[in-house]
Amino acid sequence: MSLAMGSFACGDTLMKLASTSLPTSELLFIRGAVIFVVSLSVAFVTGALRELRHVFERAMAGRMVGDVSSGWLFQSALARLPYADLTAIGQLSPMMLTAASAIFLAERVGWRRWTATAVGLIGILIIVRPGGSTFSWWALVGIASVCCTTLRDLSTRGINRRVPAILIMTLSAGAVTVAALAVAPFSNWQWPDQALMLKLSGAAMFSLLGQLGVIIAMRTGEVSAVVPFRYTIILFSIVLSVVVFGHLPDALTFLGIAIVVLAGLYTFYREQKLRRLAARQS
């Protein structure tokens, strides 16, 4: 899982570097096209395409909408915010998913997890600091990307279990690529040079490796042992922010990060405890 998070961090760093030269739509198109071609090839070789008949449903459409929206908003914020700060904001996702599950799926969420979610939001406010001299409206775009990620993850729960992960990845990449191409006439696309193509191709491969690593970790390891290592992406993002961009988060940001991580870990701990209790009772 840590290797997967490191891959995601490297991919995001390359995308941030490329964002100084190309518009968001073109960045997403090139990266999405590379991911689509590679994942489609894997889906073809593994026979995953045989399950295509199971993907034409509302849940898959919801996932695509969430994926396209979250990717677009995240990349827009990534181009303008410190990477470590945006990564920390992204860690609100598990708590948002818990809250959304209670609201939209009628799942039971006790006061402890609601409290953890509220504490996580306080951590985000410390990082973002609305009204402060360091506040950026793009932080709200980062939070909006988390909301769209929640839509994606909720929709994924409703997808037929016979649909392989590689097929879901292929269709999501295709949706992002088509959406980016659709707005091309309204963007100032440029022909990327070799260095930019290498960055974007590298970002695509790191993204694929990260997703593959998460799948392998979740299928071969104990969930309770694996999931906490998702937060190593914050460590990777801080190191890369310092080394590549020369930005070190300030003390208040570190405090906010610590609060968000602890709230997220507690939420996960409670969910695992409730699952074990339910398993014993059944």
Image: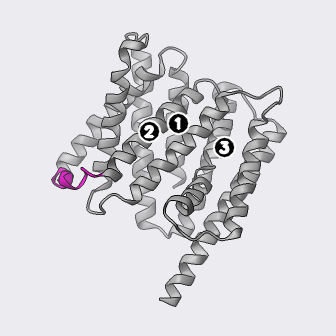
Instruction: Say which amino acid is labelled 3.
Output: Ala
| Span highlighted in magenta in the image | 46-57
* Residue denoted by label 1: 10
Q: Which badge, 3 or 2, comes first in the chain's sequence?
A: 3
Instruction: Say which amino acid is labelled 2.
Output: Phe
Q: Which badge, 2 or 1, comes first in the chain's sequence?
A: 1
* Residue denoted by label 3: 88
Mark 1 crowd level (few <14, some 14–19, many ≥20, 10 Å Cα): many
User: Front-most of 253 and 3?
Assistant: 253
The answer for how far apart the CA atoms under marks 3 and 1 are is: 16 Å
Image position of 275 (left or right of 197): right
List x then y, in percent, for residue 31: 39, 29
Query: Can see residue 21?
Result: yes
> Residue at (39%, 37%) from the top-left corner?
205
Q: Quadrant of residue 25?
A: top left
List x then y, in percent, for residue 60: 33, 49
* Residue denoted by label 2: 206
Q: Secondary structure at mark 2?
A: helix
Magenta stretch: helix, strand or loop mostly: helix
Instruction: Say which amino acid is labelled 1.
Output: Cys
